[in-house]
Image (cartoon, rainbow, N blue to C red):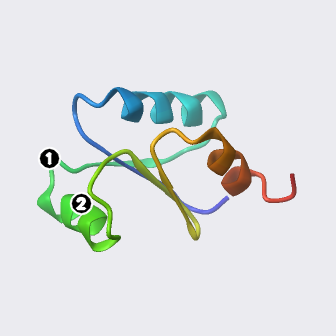
Amino acid sequence: MDNVVVYTSSNCPHCKQVKGYLGDKGIQFEERNIEENDEFAQQVWDMGLRAVPVTVIGEHRIVGMNMTQFKKALDPEA
């Protein structure tokens, strides 16, 4: 499995959903809170995005809690 990075903010309900979903699947991920680190916020900005959650799995960038994109990124054979 590629490294999984989840960009979040502190009081974001969709961020909590994404983290819960990945946790339920047993997928380890690195959380990068954009409120706690300006560099993480800049990384999201540099992707051309303005909102979190953003989940990066390999070449996939998933904005929000998009089940279809998560399934495609996590199980490309499906």
**Could you tell me residue 27's position as x and y percent?**
61, 42
**Could you tell me residue 67's position as x and y percent?**
63, 39
Q: What residue lies at 51% left-to-right and 38% top-to-bottom? A: 65
**Mark 2 = which residue?**
40
Q: Secondary structure at mark 1?
A: loop
Name the mark on residue 25. Answer: none
Instruction: Give the residue type at disc 1.
Output: Glu
Relative side of 50 to 47, left or right: left
Disc 1: CA contacts within 10 A as few (<14), some (14-19) or many (>=20): few
**Could you tell me residue 8's position as x and y percent?**
31, 43
Q: Secondary structure at mark 2?
A: helix
Relative side of 43 to 21, left or right: left
Reply above or below: 21 against 52. Answer: above
**Mark 1 = which residue?**
36
Q: Residue furthest right?
A: 77
Q: What residue lies at 38% left-to-right and 35% top-to-bottom? A: 15
Using the image as rendered, state which of residue 51 and residue 16 is in the foreground: 51
Do the residues bearing badges 2 and 1 touch, measured as CB atoms within 8 Å?
Answer: yes
Q: What residue lies at 14% left-to-right and 47% top-to-bottom? A: 36
Reply above or below: 34 against 11. Answer: below
Instruction: Give the residue type at disc 2.
Output: Phe
